[in-house]
Image (cartoon, coloured by chain):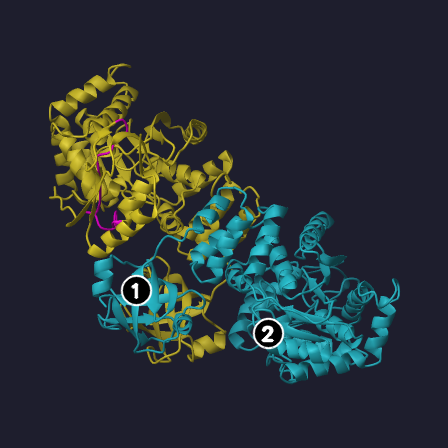
Chain colours: A yellow, B cyan
Amino acid sequence: MVNGLIVKSLGIDTYRENIIFMNAECRICKSEGFSALTRVLVEFKNKRIIATLNVVNSELLELDEAGLSIEAMKRLGVNGGETIHVFHLKPIESLSKVRSKMYGNELKDSDFSEIIADVVAGQYSNIELAAFISACSGDNLTITEIIGLTRAMVENSEKMKWSREMVLDKHCVGGLPGNRTTPIVVSIAAAAGLTIPKTSSRAITSPAGTADVMATLTTVNLTAEQMKETVESEGGCLVWGAGVKLSPADDILISVERALDVDSEGQMIASVMSKKIAAGSTHVVIEIPVGPTAKVRSMEAALKLKYYFKAVAAAFDIFIEIVISDGSQPVGIGIGPVLEAIDIISILQNEIHAPQDLKKHAIEIAGLLLEMSGKYSPGTGQEVALEILQSGEAYKKFVAICKKQGGFRELHLAPFRHDILSTHSGIITAVDCRKISRIAKLAGAPRSPGAGIRFYANIGKQIQTGDVLYSVYSDSQGEMEYVKEYLGSINGVITME
Amino acid sequence: MVNGLIVKSLGIDTYRENIIFMNAECRICKSEGFSALTRVLVEFKNKRIIATLNVVNSELLELDEAGLSIEAMKRLGVNGGETIHVFHLKPIESLSKVRSKMYGNELKDSDFSEIIADVVAGQYSNIELAAFISACSGDNLTITEIIGLTRAMVENSEKMKWSREMVLDKHCVGGLPGNRTTPIVVSIAAAAGLTIPKTSSRAITSPAGTADVMATLTTVNLTAEQMKETVESEGGCLVWGAGVKLSPADDILISVERALDVDSEGQMIASVMSKKIAAGSTHVVIEIPVGPTAKVRSMEAALKLKYYFKAVAAAFDIFIEIVISDGSQPVGIGIGPVLEAIDIISILQNEIHAPQDLKKHAIEIAGLLLEMSGKYSPGTGQEVALEILQSGEAYKKFVAICKKQGGFRELHLAPFRHDILSTHSGIITAVDCRKISRIAKLAGAPRSPGAGIRFYANIGKQIQTGDVLYSVYSDSQGEMEYVKEYLGSINGVITME
C-alpha cells in the first residue's frame, strides 16, 4: 500500500497523548501535506489510533520509517518492524459540541455521550481535553448537564453487578491533607458483614489519593474479576478505580486536570457519581470538609455541592447521605501515601499514639453507613463501629482484604528528613492546608510514595520556641532543596498568637 | 555541575512547545524525581527556557545526554554538544489568575499583564494556553477585561513610531471566504498619499489570511526596520504582523486557537486592537461581514462587536469607523492564498473579468479611509478611490510596495483540479460559507498556497445541469481524495430553488 511505514521503536514516553514521528522528507508527509502537530489516523491491522505528528528532520528515521510513543505502540499492539498506515483525520464531530460549550451554550445528554465516547476512544489531543475541562470548569455546568455528563461517563464504563441487594460506598470531596478515613471505614463496614466494594482514585491535585495510600500496602491495580473475588470473599475491597475501568473517561480527564492543577465542580460530581453508579452502589455517604483553605471554603458552597449530589443521586435512584465536616486543618499526622498508611495501621491496631482526630472521623462515617444499612438502629451506628475497631475485628478484616488483593506489604519512608522548628512560642490559631499540600507535593508526594509531611501543629496546641511544627520527607536532596526554597518564599503556613 | 547534560540534536519538530528528551535512567531524572510530562527549566549560559519532559526508555540517548525539540534548540541557542542544565520549575504564579478566570472571576489589568508576559516568555504549555483561551472564549470577557487584555498585549509588543501625525489602518473581522480587500485598499490609500503601514495575520481558522495571500506575491516576513523603510518610501506596506513582533502574544495564542478551531470574541478584539495600537495607527476602519454562515451571524452580534471595538478604541484614543457588510456568500472568485492573489491582481489591472463584488467592497472601504483622513470631503471618497484604481495608479503602487518588500513574484496554482458540477438546474438561493471554507482547507489551503477553490455559484445566479459550481485545487491527490470523501458526506453547500 502506498501509505505504509515501518514502525521503529524509539522508546519515547509522551504519557497519554499518542505521538507519531515521521521523517519530514517521507513520501506520505509530502503527498498528504502533513506538517508538525497535524492530527492523523494510524492503522495497524484492525486497530486504529489518532496521533499527533512530530516531524523529524534528521537521520533518526529513514524515509519509510515511523516512530511511535510508548503508549501509542501499546494501544496499536506493535513492537517495531510492523507496517502501519497513516491517513488524514476526519474532523471529530463532537469537538463542535465542546466549542458550543466554550461559547456558553448548554449541552444535551447526547452531546456529552458523543464527547465522552470520543475521549475514551483516545480521539482528543491534550489541547482539546484542556479546552473541554476549561469549558466545564467553575460554575459552568447546570445540574442537568452534570447529570448528562454523569450518564455519559456511566455509559462508557464497565458496570459491576453484585449478587447482594445492598451495596455501600463512601467518598470524601477531599482538599484536606491526611484525611484518609476510607481504609478504616471499609474495614469496619466489611467486618460488620456489609458489602462495600470500594474503588478510589489517585491524587488529582493533592499529595495523596486513597489509591496512592493503599498502593503502598497492597496491590490496588486489580481487574474487575479480581475485585469481585475480593469482595465475594471479604465483603469489601480497596482498589484503584482506573484498574477496573469504572470510569475510563475520568482517568483521561484527570491527567489533564492534574497538569492544569484544577478541579471542576461539575466534573468532580459526575466523576464521583459515575463511579458509584458503575460500581453498582445503592447507598452512598459523601463527606464534604469545609474550611478556609480546604477545597470547599464556605458552608454556602458545601450546601450547593450537597444539593447537586442529591440531585444526581435521585436521577439514578441512589440513597445518599452528605456529611459536612470541619476542614480547618489537616487530619491525622501523616500527609503523603506511606505516611498516611502509617496512621491508618496505628488506628486499626488501636495504638496509644494513633491520631484521635482521624479515628473519630472514621467512626462517624462508618457509623452512618451502618445505620443506612438498616442493620443497626439510628443513633447506635458509631457505638457499634467503635466496638468493631477496638475488638481488632476491623484490623483483621483490613489485613484479610490486603492479602486477598495481592499481599500485605511493609512501608518504606523516604530517606531525607527536614524538621521545621517554631521560631517563637504561642498557641496555634490557623493552618494553611493548601500550602501544607503544596509542600508535601514539592517533596515528591504522591509520585514518591514515601515522601510527604508529619504534621504536629494542630490548632489550639501550645508551642515553645524550637518545637518541631512538622517534618518533611523526600526521596532526593534535590526535592528537599526545592521545598526549602519554597518555604523561604512564603509566609503563613502556620499562624500563632 | 551535577545537573549538566550534553545536548544531542534529534531533529524533532514539536512546533511551538519546547520538549526536552531525557533518558529515564539518567541521574537527573532519578535524583530530581522527573517523570513524563514534568515541566522543567532548561538553562544554557544566560538563556533559560521552560520545556516539557519526554522520557526516553531506549538507547536513543546516553545517560548524560538530552535531546531538545528544534524550536527549543533555537530558543536556547544550541546546536548539539553543549552542556545544558535542567532544574525543577517553580510554580508559574500567573496560572493562578488563569484558574481564577476559569472559575468565573473577573481579571484585573495587572492579571492580564502577568499572564501575557509569561505567555510571551514561553512559560505556558499548550495545555495551559488552551485553558486560558477557553476561559476567555465566547462571552466570558467583560469590556474592562478586553481593554486589560489589549493593554497587556500592547505592553508585550514592539511599538512602532512614525514621523507623520496620521496613520491609517483597516481590518476585517473575517469569516467570509475570498473577501481580500486589504491589498487593494492599501494600494489606493498609499497612492492617494496617505500613510497605511498594514500588518496582517495568517489564517486562524480560515483558508487564507491576508499575510498568506501576500506571501504568494512578495516577502511578508519583514523586520520592523524593513517595514519602516517600505512605508517611508511608498506610504504603505503589506506585511505579516508576527514578523515585526507587533503582538508576539497573539502569535502564540493563535497557534492553539487554530488547533482548537475556535475564535474568541474578546481575544479577537484585543488581538486586532493591540496590533493597531502597537503599529501606531491613529485612524482605523473595521469591517464586520454579517451572514448566516459567516463568523458573525446576526446584526445583534455585529452591533455588540461594534460597541466593543468603539470602547477599546476610545480607551486608547484611536479614531474608528465600523462597516457592517453583507456576509451571505463568498466575495470574489478565488478562495485560498494564490487564488485570492489572482483576483487582486485582476482588479488592480482593471481586467474585464475581475470580480466586481470584491472591487466594489474595496472601493467602499478605501473611500471611507480617504474621507476619515480629512483630505477628501464626506461623500467623495469612493469616487476618488475608483479614479485612483482605474487610472492604474493603485496597481503601480501595489507593485512598488511588493518590490520594496522583496520582489514581485509569479503565482503558482496547485496542479490537481476537481470540478463540482450542478446535478440540476435552478437559481442559487444560499451558500454555506463555513462548508466552502472547510473544503478549501481540506484541499490544503493555506498550508499549500496554491490550493483552494474557484467559486462561480453566486446567489441569484441561474444554473443549468452540468454547470461548474466551483472548482477545487490541491497540491496532492491524497488531499483531493479527502475533499471528495467530505463532499460525499455533506449536503447543503449550495442551495438552489
Q: Amino acid at mark 2?
A: Ala
Q: Is A273 part of what is drawn in magenta? A: no
Query: Which of the chains bears the disc numbered 1?
Result: B
Task: Sort mark 2 into few (<14), some (14-19) or many (20+) by Cα contacts within 10 Å.
Answer: some
Q: Which residues are magenta?
A: A443-460
- Percent of width and height locating residue B432: 67, 59
* Helix, strand or loop for disc 1: strand
Please give the label number shown on residue B86.
Answer: 1
Residue visible at 65% across and 63% down? Answer: B276
**What residue would you read off at disc 2?**
B224
Q: Is A446 part of what is drawn in magenta? A: yes
Residue visible at 80% across and 69% down? Answer: B363
Looking at the rendered image, the quarter that the C terminus of chain B falls into is: bottom right
Seen in the image, is A184 located left or right of residue B171? left
> From this viewpoint, is residue B66 visible?
yes
Q: Marks 2/1: CA distance?
A: 34 Å
